[in-house]
Structure formats: C-alpha cells, structure tokens
Amino acid sequence: MSFRIAVVQPMAHQPPDDEKNVSDAIGHIKQASSDGADFVCFPESYPGPWRMPATYNPIERISDAAAKYNIHVQFGTLDPISEIENTAYNLLMLAYPDGRNPVAYKRTHPPGPWIYTGGGYWEFQYVPGDDFPVFDTIHGRVGMAMCSEVYVPEVSRALALRGAEIIFLPGGVDKQKLWATWRNLIWSRSIENLAVTVTTQNLFTPEQKGLAMVATPEEILFESTIAGSYIVNIDFTRIRELRSQNDEVLSANHNAAKAGVLDQWQRPELYTRFYPDVTATASLDKVSSKS
C-alpha cells in the first residue's frame, strides 16, 4: 500500500527569531494534509529551539497540529538537561495523527561534547543519547537519525536491523563542500539497508543550496536544492520484496540493489575483530586500576 510524504525544505528563521518557525511549521502541516500527505518531514532543529537556555517548546503545538490535520509529523527540537550548564539532547520527534504522545530519538553520534557550540546557528552543550528506537505506524516502521550521522553507517544499520523500513535523516544547514558526499551517502544508506531514506534541510537565504531527497535502494525518487514543500509517493512493497529475498547469481537481471544484505550477507562472528568489545575493555581497565 502506498502513502505520501511531504518533504519540507523551508526558508527558516534563524536565532534569535527561531520561534517564528513554529507557526510556519503548522502552516506547512496544514498544507501537507490538504495535499493528501500522510507524513511531513522537517529539517533538523525545525521548528527549534536552536539554543540554550530554551525559550520555547514546540512539542505540544506540533503534536496538536498533527492530530488536528490527521498526519504524522517528523520534526526537530531540543530536550534541555541543565540551564546552568547549557546542556541538552538534540531530538528528532515523530507526532502521530491520532493524538498519542509523540516519540523521540536523541542524537547518538558523535560522542559529546563536540558540536553545536561556537557557530552562528546552534548554541548549546550537546549530550549524546544511547539508543536506536524504531516506531510503528499504520504505514510501516520508522527510524530517525540526524544530519551528519549519515556519515556513520552503524546508526542507519542499527535502525534497519530493528525493522525500520523508512529512515528520516534530516539535516541542519547548507552542506557547502560536503554537499556531494552527503547526497551520495543518503542514497548509500538506503542501498545498504534496503530502506527508504528521506532528508531535507533549513535554508536561510535563497542563495543557499539545499538537499531535499527521497531515495529507495534502486532509485532516487526525488531531490531538490531549493525551498519548497514536495509531495512524494512511497510504497514499501519493493522494499519488503528485497528484504525477503536471498541474493543469487542472476539477481542482477531483475534487482537494481543487492538483496540479503541485512541477513544473508552478514558474518557477525567476524565483527568483534574490528569492533572490539569496548564494554569488556572498560571493565578490564577498572580492574587494573584497582590492583
């Protein structure tokens, strides 16, 4: 069964005017619903806030809009930890059309603190999360990862191994010289995980180059570099076919992506050779320090 995603690449308000994004986001949600969309995908940190201390919280208003307009909404915000230390989790959230509580992914990579301070947009002390949740919807299972986590294949793989059929990978701002490799990786994460990947980003001036994109393992369905709200039709039938198949000698005659990469191709008994058990190493270090 097919469904529709509104991929929103907004002309966003940057701090200190970022609260204006909330009303704009609700307008995009209303329009997406009117256009027959089942999901809305917003960029990282949209509608915000972008900085600590957080001066507003958009979660209730966005969740209410999702219920009012009967649509799933993936959006970005902060989860403050300490105003004194300016610490916060960076969240991607999914609001549901039936009004249930929204769910969240806390950015996990890289280890903090490192990013989101000292620049022109964000200003908070980033604290990483430590989980890779996936969420069921009436259309299929959803995973979320954030921005440059696309450069860390383990993040998307963790979501796919937990059953995510679509992975939202929204970005923050203009990718500059990273644009081409970023675009490549959005599709690569789709190919290697047999999942749909979706990305978009904030634009602050018409001159900036966006990256709104929807990819399946076998093709790029949509991409745009300019501001707008774009409706893309999605169907998981082919994703599920590829996931159910084994790769065979003549598979290339009818498949444009490799089947079996999530199970048939895997050799987990080898992976600790290049991914040492850091938990065990840490335990040994503690024992050594006590002796």
Image: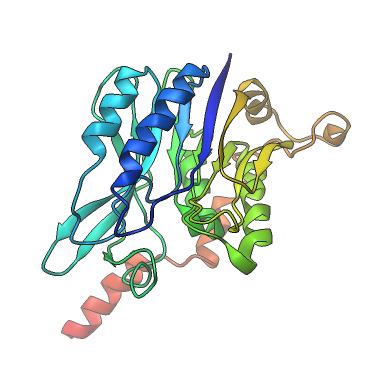
Give the side of residue 91 with respect to residue 157, left or right.
Answer: left
Q: So how many labels did they put on this image?
A: 0
Q: What is the x, y in percent for residue 276?
A: 45, 67
Q: Residue furthest left?
A: 84
Give the side of residue 169 with respect to residue 107, left or right.
Answer: right
Q: Please state which of residues 269 and 237 is positioned toward the viewer in this rendering.
A: 237
Note whether 126 is above or below 98 in the view shown: below
Q: Residue at x 80, y 32 (%)?
A: 255
Q: Please state which of residues 165 and 21 is positioned toward the viewer in this rendering.
A: 21
Q: Residue at x 48, y 25 (%)?
A: 32
User: Which quadrant, please, contains the N terminus?
Assistant: top right
Q: What is the x, y in percent for residue 194?
A: 63, 37
- Does any portion of residue 46 appear in the rendered image? yes
Give the side of residue 142 with respect to residue 65, left or right.
Answer: right
- Does any portion of residue 261 appear in the rendered image? no
Q: Residue at x 26, y 21 (%)?
A: 99
Q: Please state which of residues 241 and 111 is positioned toward the viewer in this rendering.
A: 111
Q: Indicate the quadrant where residue 162 lies.
A: top left
Note whether 248 is above or below 188 in the view shown: above
Q: What is the x, y in percent for residue 9?
A: 52, 43
Q: Indicate the quadrant where residue 54 lies.
A: bottom left
Q: How is the image coloured?
A: rainbow
User: Which quadrant, please, contains the C terminus?
Assistant: bottom left
Q: What is the x, y in percent for residue 243?
A: 63, 30
Q: Residue at x 75, y 35 (%)?
A: 247
